Each structure stands twice: as C-alpha cells, then as structure tokens.
C-alpha cells in the first residue's frame, strides 16, 4: 500500500457558475471532480430562497501544481466578482497515479 499527498480543492459557488468552472477544469486538464448541493450560512447571511440559485460544492483531488494553477484562475476570474469560497486541504490517497 502506497499513500501520496495530493491537494483537495473545494469550491463553493452558485450553481450558475458550474459550467464556467468546469470549463476551467478542462483547460487545466483536471478530469476528476465531485459536485453536490451546498447549504449553509456565512458572512453575508443565510440564503433564504433559491431565487438567486442554489449553492454547489465542487471538489477535486489534484497535484500541488494543478491546485496552484486552479486557485490562480479562480482568484483572477471568480473570487472578486462572485460569492465564491475556495479552500485547499492536504490529503493522502491510495492509487496516487490517478491524481496528477
């Protein structure tokens, strides 16, 4: 058994941004991800309706290099203009060849 450290990049954003963010994944050759609904409360209040859309949580496991490139794109294009939250966690995975 061999574990290797990779980066878990988590993005919380409006579902209307899903297509655009996944296009960025394609440009960066990030093929694996998980998307699920996200509900919560933050600095700017709790969402009381779906009128403005739902929040989603996108997660991907990638190398440090790809994580840094993705974070730069998100910072440049999305974090300033939208209520996007992004964070990175160090994780260890089995089958490290799947996460490059």
Image (cartoon, helix red, strand yellow):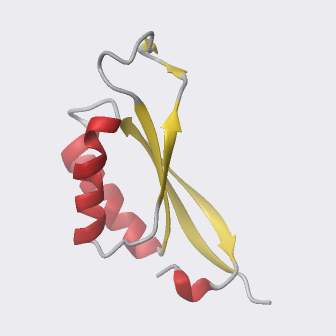
Name which residue lies at 37% across and 65% down: 68
Report x, y in % for residue 42: 50, 20
Extreme residue toward the front, this view: 50
Q: In which quarter of the image is residue 50?
A: top left
Name which residue lies at 19% across and 47% down: 77
Query: Vertically, is 20 above or below 92?
Result: above
Name which residue lies at 39% across and 28% down: 54
Query: Vertically, is 96 above or below 44?
Result: below
* Number of numbered discs visible in the structure rendering: 0
Observer-nearest of 27 and 63? 27
Report x, y in % for residue 78: 24, 42
Query: Vertically, is 25 above or below 39?
Result: below
Q: Is residue 73 left or right of residue 48?
A: left
Report x, y in % for residue 96: 61, 84
Q: In which quarter of the image is residue 30?
A: bottom left
Report x, y in % for residue 2: 74, 89
Q: In this view, does 93 lie to the left or right of 21?
A: right
Q: Quadrant of residue 22?
A: bottom left
Quadrant assignment for the N terminus: bottom right
Name which residue lies at 72% across and 82% down: 3
Extreme residue toward the right, this view: 1
């Amino acid at each position: 058994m061999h574990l290797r450290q990779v980066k878990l990049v988590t993005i919380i954003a409006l579902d209307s941004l899903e297509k655009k963010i996944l296009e960025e994944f394609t440009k960066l050759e990030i093929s694996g991800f998980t998307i699920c609904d996200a509900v919560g409360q933050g600095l700017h209040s709790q969402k009381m309706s779906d009128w403005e859309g739902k929040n989603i949580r996108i997660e991907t496991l990638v190398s440090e290099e790809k994580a840094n490139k993705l974070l730069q794109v998100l910072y440049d294009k999305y974090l300033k203009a939208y209520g996007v939250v992004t964070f990175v966690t160090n994780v260890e995975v089995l089958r490290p060849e799947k996460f490059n």
